[in-house]
């Protein structure tokens, strides 16, 4: 194992903050994203505790995260050669099966995918990981670079007037580049064909990693200008007939300067103000039903007892 710079010690020794469940309320980026989409949907999920149904996309994403994170952990804590000896394709497939079984049990033992669809996702995962293993050197190097953490726990109080509302998240992985004295926060995303321009302009989608940067900086008193952020996007599908090679991996670095961070933080604070009282308890009120194209994919669509959107039109 490489000798690590001394000023990384507080990060390496950081442990997950214990939550006082008797009075503290946990909020996450996914909650914020749901609220931005539809406050009423947020209320149904986070207050009324109607769970999200399992999905093949989530199952795939969890398995892909596990495989890539395991490779990087071995690579930076041991060596690239040691990482190459790990069978991350098998790890992906085993994790995929295990996660599917969990979802199947949670779904009252009702299948949420077919054998053909699962086989397709298996093959997509294999193709992604084989591409990653061939091209890994284009994306990651161990030269003067250290692994700070994988699934790094981050807990922060986003709004000083709501001390019992705590933001909680897990950063997929963080690297430290000794040559430039900078941290790099990564978020792994799985996508069918990659992020298009409209995805990159989607401020709700990009806000996750910007919140990580802002809260990490404040929590550890780390110079925010010495933190870079990047989405590491893996594509299930590529256009095979393209005359040019299309990579299975896409990197996207969103703008994360002062103005962008300020706007993102303010948006998250607005979410807290709209949904919670000063004591941290969710507000009992009517939440806006945001009617739009996304409604047809909503789990509560066509369920009048939970969401009669006709009354919102």
Image: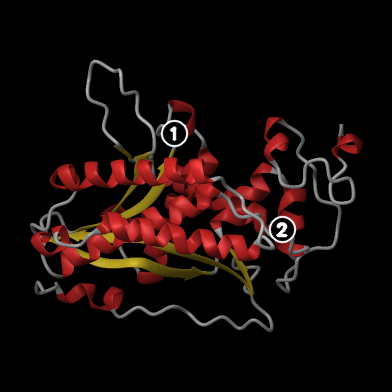
What residue does disc 2 label?
A: 45
Q: Secondary structure at mark 2?
A: helix
Q: Nearer the viewer, residue 203 or 290?
A: 290
Query: Alpha carbon of mark 2 to alpha carbon of mark 1: how far?
Result: 27 Å
> Coloured how?
secondary structure
Q: Classify residue 167 as left or right of residue 97.
A: right
Does residue 123 appear in this view?
yes
Whether pointer 2 and pointer 1 mark residues with C-beta atoms closer than 8 Å, the reply is: no
Quarter of the picture containing the C terminus is top right
Q: Residues within 10 Å of mark 2 (few under 14, many from 20)?
A: some
Residue 300 picture location, percent across and down: 77, 47
Q: Classify residue 4 as left or right of residue 30.
A: left
Task: Please tell me the numbered disc located at residue 56.
Answer: none
Marks 2 and 1, the one that precedes in the sequence:
2
What residue does disc 1 label?
A: 200
Q: Secondary structure at mark 1?
A: helix
Q: Quadrant of residue 131?
A: top left
Residue 30 picture location, percent across and down: 57, 54
Quarter of the picture containing the N terminus is bottom left
Residue 88, compared with residue 16, is above or below; it is above
Residue 265, compared with residue 85, is above or below; it is above
Q: Nearer the viewer, residue 28 or 225?
A: 28
Residue 44 picture location, percent across and down: 76, 56
Residue 58 picture location, percent across and down: 51, 52
Q: Residues within 10 Å of mark 1 (few under 14, many from 20)?
A: some
Q: Classify residue 283 as left or right of residue 2.
A: right
Residue at 26 percent of width and 58 percent of height: 88
Residue 260, compared with residue 186, is above or below; it is above
Furthest residue in direction front, as rendered: 115
Residue at 27 percent of width and 76 percent of height: 12
């Amino acid at each position: 194992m490489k000798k690590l710079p001394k000023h990384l010690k507080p990060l390496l020794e950081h442990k997950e903050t214990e939550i006082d469940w008797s009075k503290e309320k946990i909020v996450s980026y996914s909650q914020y994203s749901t609220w931005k989409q539809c406050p009423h949907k947020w209320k149904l999920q986070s207050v009324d505790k109607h769970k999200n149904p399992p999905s093949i996309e989530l199952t795939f994403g969890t398995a892909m995260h596990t495989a890539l994170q395991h490779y990087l952990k071995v690579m930076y804590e041991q060596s690239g050669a040691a990482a190459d000896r790990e069978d991350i394709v098998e790890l992906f497939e085993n994790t995929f099966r295990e996660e599917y079984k969990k979802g199947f049990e949670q779904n009252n033992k009702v299948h949420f995918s077919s054998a053909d669809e699962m086989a397709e996702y298996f093959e997509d995962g294999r193709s992604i990981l084989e591409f990653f293993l061939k091209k890994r050197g284009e994306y990651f190097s161990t030269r003067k670079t250290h692994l700070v953490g994988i699934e790094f726990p981050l807990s922060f109080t986003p709004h000083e007037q709501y001390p019992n509302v705590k933001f909680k998240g897990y950063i997929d992985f963080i690297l430290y580049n000794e040559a430039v004295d900078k941290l790099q926060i990564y978020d792994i995303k799985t996508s069918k064909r990659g992020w298009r321009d409209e995805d990159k302009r989607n401020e709700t989608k990009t806000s996750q990693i910007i919140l990580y940067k802002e809260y990490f900086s404040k929590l550890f008193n780390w110079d925010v200008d010495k933190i870079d952020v990047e989405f590491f996007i893996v594509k299930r599908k590529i256009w095979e007939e393209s005359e040019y090679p299309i990579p299975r991996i896409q990197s996207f670095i969103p703008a994360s300067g002062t103005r962008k961070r300020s706007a993102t933080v303010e948006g998250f604070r607005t979410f807290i103000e709209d949904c919670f009282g000063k004591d941290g308890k969710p507000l009992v009120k009517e939440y806006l039903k945001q009617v739009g194209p996304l409604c047809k994919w909503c789990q509560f669509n066509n369920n009048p007892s939970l969401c009669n959107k006709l009354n919102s039109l």
